[in-house]
Amino acid sequence: DVKVTQSSRYLVKRTGEKVFLECVQDMDHENMFWYRQDPGLGLRLIYFSYDVKMKEKGDIPEGYSVSREKKERFSLILESASTNQTSMYLCASTGLNQPQHFGDGTRLSIL
Amino acid sequence: GENVEQHPSTLSVQEGDSAVIKCTYSDSASNYFPWYKQELGKRPQLIIDIRSNVGEKKDQRIAVTLNKTAKHFSLHITETQPEDSAVYFCAASITMGGNKLVFGAGTILRVKS
């Protein structure tokens, strides 16, 4: 069974802080994704990665960056957190011809 | 780019009735359409998906239909039960797997017992 693990379920940070959200998958998947989920807006793609050290912008990359140094780990970075980045963040992974599998999410509050 | 619209945003049904959620997409190149169910406080989970070479797919009480000409696909849940209460998301993609999914805004389904 695919397991996608996000490091924190809940996180509270202050405006201006640098925030790291971590995601690890155990299925040797090539592709990993970061989404944010907001009520009435569904899931919106921030960044995705199709290989180690490779990344592509999604639909809402502004204010975020990512890092993929190892195949199993995909990190989302908020360079200088702002209150409008308060949201639920979901990580997903997939392999060739497989559906996306999601982690449990990190509910991030920026005060 | 792809745009997916989902309706209705909320849906209340009596236990035992059917529920239908509809989505439209804009990119005619899309050929993979999954549906995810997200229960309160839990991760989205894939419940059914369909590829463009198929018009309909069923899995017990759940079915998905696809009309490529109209760029429209729907989720049908029959004999609804309280445990079907959740948020349902449709999505579209050019391929399964590597390509990014574009999601609809979600439908909150409430099944009243």
Image: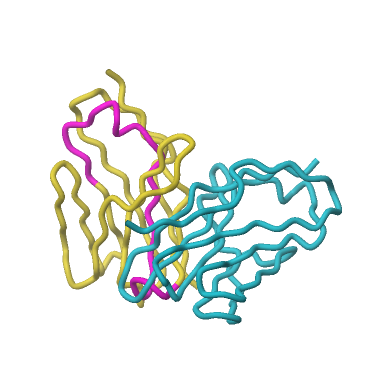
| Residue A40, image x, y percentages | 54, 44
Colouring: by chain
Chain in yellow colour: B
Does residue B55 appear left or right of residue A106 in this picture? left
**In the rendered image of this protein, does residue B7 appear above or below residue B31?**
above
Figure quadrant of residue B65: bottom left
Between B89 and A50, the one nearer to me in the picture = A50
Quadrant where the N terminus of chain A sits is bottom left
**Residue appearing at x 42%, y 71% in the figure:** A29
Does residue B103 appear left or right of residue A2 in this picture? right
Visual hue assigned to chain A: cyan
Look at the image and say whether residue B88 sits in the magenta stretch.
yes
**In the rendered image of this protein, does residue B3 appear above or below residue A43?**
below
Look at the image and say whether residue B12 sits in the magenta stretch.
no
| Residue A78, image x, y percentages | 74, 60
Quadrant where the C terminus of chain A sits is top right
**In the rendered image of this protein, does residue B103 appear above or below residue A48?**
above
Figure quadrant of residue A110: top right
Which region of the structure is painted magenta? Answer: B76-99
Does residue A61 appear left or right of residue B104 in this picture? right
Between B10 and A65, the one nearer to me in the picture = A65
How many marks the image carries: the answer is 0
| Residue A25, image x, y percentages | 47, 63
**Residue appearing at x 45%, y 65% in the figure:** A93
**Residue appearing at x 36%, y 29% in the figure:** B110
**Residue appearing at x 61%, y 59% in the figure:** A22
| Residue B69, image x, y percentages | 25, 69
